[in-house]
Amino acid sequence: MGKKRYSQKDVSKPMTESLGIEDLLALKTSAAGHYYAVHQRYFSDVKLTCPACGSTKTRCSKVVKRSFKDILWDDAPPVEGEEQQFKVVDLTFYQRYLRCDSCNNSVFPEPIEFGDKGCRYTNRLSDALADGTFRFSYKKVCAYFGVPTSTASIGPIMRRRIQYRESLLLPVSTPKKLGIMEVLFFREAHPVVFALRDEGVYCIGILEDSSEETVLTFLRTLDTAKVDTVFIDPVDSIRSAAATAFPDANLVVSDECILRYARDAMLEIIHEDGKRFPVKFKDAVLTIPNKHLQSDYDRRQVKDGMESRPRLKSAYDKHQELMAGDWTYETLGQWAHSLPDDLPEFETLIDVIDLFEQEINDFIETDEKPPDFYPTALQAVCEAFKGMPHCIFDVLRARCFLTISHDTIEENGKKYRLGIHTTRLTQNMNEISKNIKEARAYGL
Ligand SMILES: [Zn+2]
């Protein structure tokens, strides 16, 4: 391939300027909605280095036509209250592939900065799509920009933007007390990591899965010497990871966790046996201590509803007994083993009580209790996850974690991140869920 197909004369200066991608030269064949371009090194004699052997004895072996969708933003600043104007265009890029004469077999494409491997959108279009998807559904965002919705590309698009936004985050200020809770999102368990501070509960991480490796990798980003108590969920892999990361810390399973597991079991039973139960908001009413019910009327309604539902009644009574609280490990064990056989929903909790004796005991004995607002904060987070529409994990995490600013603190003249206060986290998540559910048009 000696002769080049294009020469300097084929380059259009105005089209190159209006395209405005560094290193790219637009050809005269370009039109307003469709650009054709080559890399500026196309016309230079600089030899590219072989990525396999480092030799510069390389030569062009072929040119591959690659099609991208690209976005051109309007230079004019947007009118207040309006979105910035843009145009989505096609971009055909003639990418050169080079052969290395030193290691013979090696053929590689010339490196480019404006687009990722395998992605049919330029990076700047990907970024626009990702920024929109942080707050709206991907489908809606694609419709707004007028590009095809390819679910295959959403992962790489989001990961790229997430990496960038994450690189802007400050290092975490490691707290003395940590909480690790598993939340369920469309049947997948994701550990959420919290910093427990006097001022509140802060979310510092949302992890893809509960494997020991994933959890440990995250925990190792913290200053492990600072942590003295970890409130874990009773999951083997989480316990192992925490024990490895914080060998000197106290790992405990708190009353919050036991009550959360019990509440989840209770909710399952309510959904199974509580159809047409004669109270409003039965999930809430039937899972709080009876003495907290608003009125005698409520109490009577609960009683009436239980009459024809014996299994629900026995679960309710057992749950009330547990919530009355102040247990020792021994009384907790007695409670667990007094549960009737027809309430299999409680089996997970029974296993937890049996298998995490040490951690439950350590909690009962420690003076390091979580703050009073801990249970409410965690419950709000669980509810917010329940309300989020389905999406891939990267999007879920980005929506929760990268759309709101983190609280910061200054220590020894350096700025650190506290995480996101759970009140703001859940507000933000609920707002996003609402945005998406109301199917509000993007940009309005
Ligand atoms: Zn080579």
Image: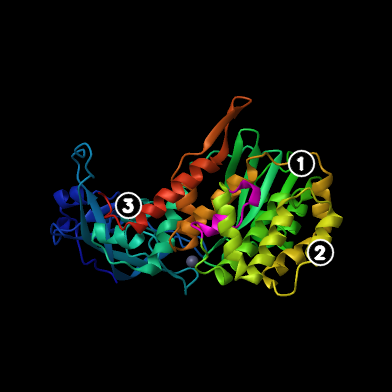
Task: List the single residue furthest toward the top.
Answer: 413
Identify residue type, mark 2: Asp
Image side of residue 398 versus residue 95, left or right: right
Q: Is residue 258 visible?
A: no
Closer mark to the observer between disc 1 and disc 3? 1
Indicate the position of residue 105 as horizontal and vertical percent values: 47, 75
Residue at image location 66% in from the left, 39% down from the top:
372
Marking on residue 228: 1
The quadrant the N terminus occupies is bottom left
Quadrant hosting residue 208: bottom right
Tell me the residue that label 3 is attached to.
128
Q: CA distance from mark 2 to mark 1?
A: 25 Å
What residue is drawn where x is 76% and y is 48%?
246
Numbered range of the magenta stretch: 279-293
Q: Residues within 10 Å of mark 1 (few under 14, many from 20)?
A: some
The quadrant where residue 58 appears:
bottom left
Q: Are marks 3 and 2 in contact (CB under 8 Å)?
A: no
